[in-house]
Image (cartoon, rainbow, N blue to C red):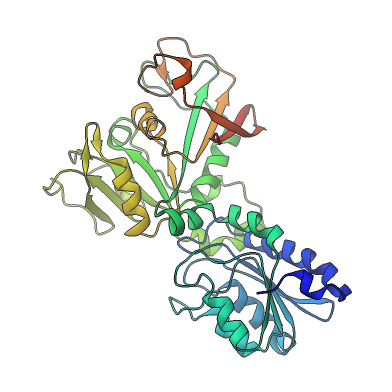
């Protein structure tokens, strides 16, 4: 694999970063391609872009194949810019490396290697063995990885990328003492949550939330605030709901719960060896995992979601106890907090339940990544402090 230093005298390479930047933008067109990575591809011939492609959803054409089909004969002798190393194995679709070879590309430029052990360098090798020059633009690697944080974490650490969503009043409360919480945040903030759900492999909650609030935790397309073009580009992605996961150590989930009736897969993680007392629909599966003091062992749940169900990104939407447990166990990669300009009072329900500290040195330290206004609310994105 080569870098631009190998082509110092070729002035045409000065435009290569422009094409790679476009490939990365194309990768971000879709909200999710789980369990696959989001990938974009640009094919040029001479100094002209002849086609573009992106991976719309698992099971559909990969970005390279879409671009090749659009380019037709113009792919012959052209250069493909791909935001991630082309795959080299047959899954639901054929290997992209072979498609690029058969299309007669002269060069392939990538932002970085695929962390999947089935690929990781073998895609590059297949291309080079076929006489295609492969170039690496390492300055774009962080952007390509950021698009696929969950995919990279699943293949390198055996765990999904975990986001915890919280919504609170200005005084850190989530609901009145009576339980009333609709709605603390604005419709704009709730629409933003729908986009985050749509970009997730899994929406995870606890059985207490299911019993108390009876949520569906699905993606409501009409609330996504997507324009017509965005909706068209994401219609394949949105055709399948994220998996809903309920942590329920004693199998107390009511058989009438709305989350069970909504479209899509539902997994109930439990420590119980018995069967659910109600006859569950075919889309609901009971998964037994290890036990800990508070119920199901969270680490076991995440490991299972990554290894058994190939989940890249988990969005936690839960009550104060389960949310607090995820934070205490240092299992949250990104915290998304919506703050409404309301004050609910000291008897209202707290945001998190976390064990008391004996000193400030024990406090969980986070790093603020982004703060934006959404409607009347504030959205803050935080991550683990390095």
Q: Quadrant of residue 101?
A: bottom right
The answer to whether residue 254 of the structure is visible from this angle is no
Q: Quadrant of residue 27?
A: bottom right
Please tell me which residue is depicted at 51% across the width and 51% down the height of the picture: 198
Find residue 38 and report its horizontal and vertical position in percent.
57, 62
Residue placed most toward the observer, 260 or 359: 359
Q: Quadrant of the N terminus?
A: bottom right
Q: Looking at this view, name the residue that lies furthest to the top.
A: 346
Count of numbered labels shown in the rendering: 0
Find residue 360 and report its horizontal and vertical position in percent.
48, 16
Q: Quadrant of residue 102?
A: bottom right
Q: Quadrant of the C terminus?
A: top right
Image check: 266 left or right of 7? left
359 to 245, vertically: above or below: above
215 to 276, vertically: above or below: above
Q: Looking at this view, name the residue that lies furthest to the left.
A: 274
Find residue 79 and report its horizontal and vertical position in percent.
73, 79
Image check: 17 left or right of 99? right
Residue placed most toward the observer, 352 or 355: 355
The answer to whether residue 142 of the structure is visible from this angle is yes
Image check: 165 left or right of 39? left
Find residue 100 and report its horizontal and vertical position in percent.
62, 83
284 to 206, vertically: above or below: below
Image check: 263 left or right of 28? left
């Amino acid at each position: 694999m080569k870098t631009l230093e190998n082509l110092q005298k070729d002035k045409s390479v000065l435009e290569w970063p422009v094409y790679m930047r476009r490939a990365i933008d194309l990768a971000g067109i879709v909200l999710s391609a789980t369990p696959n990575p989001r990938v974009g591809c640009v094919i040029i011939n001479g100094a002209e872009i002849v086609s573009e492609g992106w991976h719309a959803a698992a099971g559909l054409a990969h970005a390279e194949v879409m671009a090749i089909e659009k380019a037709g004969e113009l792919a012959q002798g052209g250069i493909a810019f791909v935001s991630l190393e082309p795959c080299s194995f047959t899954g639901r679709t054929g290997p992209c490396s072979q498609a690029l070879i058969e299309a007669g590309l002269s060069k392939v430029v990538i932002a970085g290697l695929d962390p999947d052990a089935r690929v990781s360098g073998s895609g590059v090798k297949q291309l080079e063995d076929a006489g295609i020059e492969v170039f690496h633009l390492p300055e774009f690697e962080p952007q390509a990885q950021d698009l696929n944080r969950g995919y990279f974490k699943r293949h390198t650490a055996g765990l999904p990328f975990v986001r915890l969503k919280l919504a609170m009043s200005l005084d850190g409360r989530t609901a009145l003492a009576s339980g009333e919480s609709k709605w603390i945040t604005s419709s704009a903030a709730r629409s933003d949550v729908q986009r985050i759900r749509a970009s997730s492999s899994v929406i995870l909650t606890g059985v207490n939330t299911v019993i108390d609030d009876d949520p569906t935790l699905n993606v409501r397309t009409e609330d996504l605030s997507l324009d017509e073009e965005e909706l068209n580009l994401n219609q394949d992605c949105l055709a399948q709901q994220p998996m809903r996961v309920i942590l329920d150590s004693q199998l107390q989930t009511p058989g009438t719960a709305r989350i069970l009736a909504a479209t899509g897969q539902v997994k109930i993680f439990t420590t119980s060896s018995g069967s659910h007392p109600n006859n569950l629909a075919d889309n609901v599966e009971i998964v037994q995992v290890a036990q800990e003091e508070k119920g199901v062992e969270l680490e076991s749940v995440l490991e299972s979601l990554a290894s058994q169900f190939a989940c890249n990104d988990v969005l936690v939407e839960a009550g104060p106890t389960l949310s607090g447990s995820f934070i205490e166990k240092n299992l949250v990669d990104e915290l998304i907090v919506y703050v409404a300009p309301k004050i609910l009072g000291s008897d209202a329900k707290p945001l998190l339940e976390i064990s008391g500290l004996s000193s400030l040195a024990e406090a969980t330290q986070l790093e603020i990544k982004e703060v934006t206004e959404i409607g009347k609310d504030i959205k803050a994105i935080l991550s683990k402090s390095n």
